[in-house]
Amino acid sequence: MKEVKIGCGKPTGTVVGEPAKKKPLERTDPEKKEAAMVTAKVGGKAPDFQAPAFYKGKFIQVKLSDYLKKWTCLCFYPGDFTFV
Amino acid sequence: MLSVSVDSHFVHKVWQDEELSKMVKGGVPFPMVSDAGGKVGRVYGVYDEIAGVNVRGRFIIDPDGVIQAMEILTPPVGRNVSELIRQIQAFQHVRKTKGAEATPSGWTPGKPTLKPGPELVGKVWKVWKPDLAF
């Protein structure tokens, strides 16, 4: 089976449909504040992220912007094996 | 559909194999995303720093990547899937009419929509009754 490189879950710092910032943001980088301000609100573009996932028996890397052009539901919950 | 929790993708696998596949034939049919550390939950405003988990946040995102709806619950109360589907149907209808129609409270496919404009001001009572909200 092909090995898929899987990183940890992290926001890209931009909204879906916009390229990620080229260089990693430095503490003094004025863009850092802007990137940190990308938050979810209705009527606004969804903050993009990439993260590992389990899907159809495989581990994959998911990127929210791959779901552009589709209706998407993002559903957070407290934890696996919880009750509700 | 993407589900997200702070559990690792390995734990997602075990949960799917050991429990979810016994509730849903073949297991849940969508990617189970791992947000270890809650970095994604933080930008969506659903990460509880004290508990260290993401609370029940649900976001409907349209094909342009715009968040059309969000609902956030504390952990002990579950969601209503019928209401999620109703909202998606309503947003899809509004999008299809390019915003010419709006869906009043309780709208489901087949119920009357509203066409906002000068003629409707003060006249909603003629075309919409509170019974339609339920």
Image (tube, coloured by chain):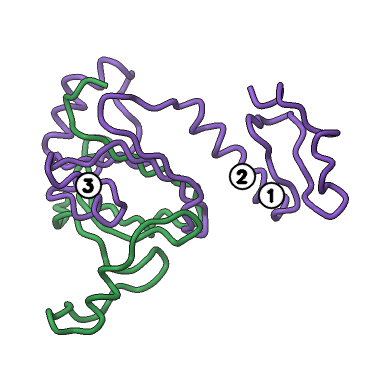
Rendering coords of residue A10 (x, y %): 20, 59
For mark 1, name the chain.
B
Q: What colour do you see for chain A?
A: green
Task: Residue type at mark 3: give it.
Answer: Tyr
Q: CA distance from mark 2 to mark 3?
A: 29 Å
Q: Which residue is mark 1?
A: B96
Task: Residue type at mark 2: give it.
Answer: Gln
- Within 10 Å of disc 3 (Cα), the crowding (few <14, some 14-19, many 20+) is many
Q: Residue at x 23, y 48 (%)?
A: A60
- Within 10 Å of disc 2 (Cα), the crowding (few <14, some 14-19, many 20+) is some
Q: Is residue B130 above or below residue A66?
A: above
**Dot label at residue B92:** 2
Residue in front for this viewpoint, B39 or B118: B118
Is tag 1's residue or tag 3's residue first in the polypeptide sequence? 3
Quarter occupied by the N terminus of chain B: top left
Asked if residue B107 lies left or right of residue A39, the reply is: right
Is tag 2's residue or tag 3's residue first in the polypeptide sequence? 3
Q: Are marks 2 and 3 on the same chain?
A: yes
Q: Which residue is mark 3?
A: B47
Q: Is residue B60 above or below residue B104?
A: below
Rendering coords of residue B90 (x, y %): 62, 39
Quarter occupied by the C terminus of chain B: top right
For the image, the number of numbered tags is 3
Q: What colour do you see for chain B?
A: purple
Secondary structure type for disc 3: strand
Rendering coords of residue A57 (x, y %): 22, 35
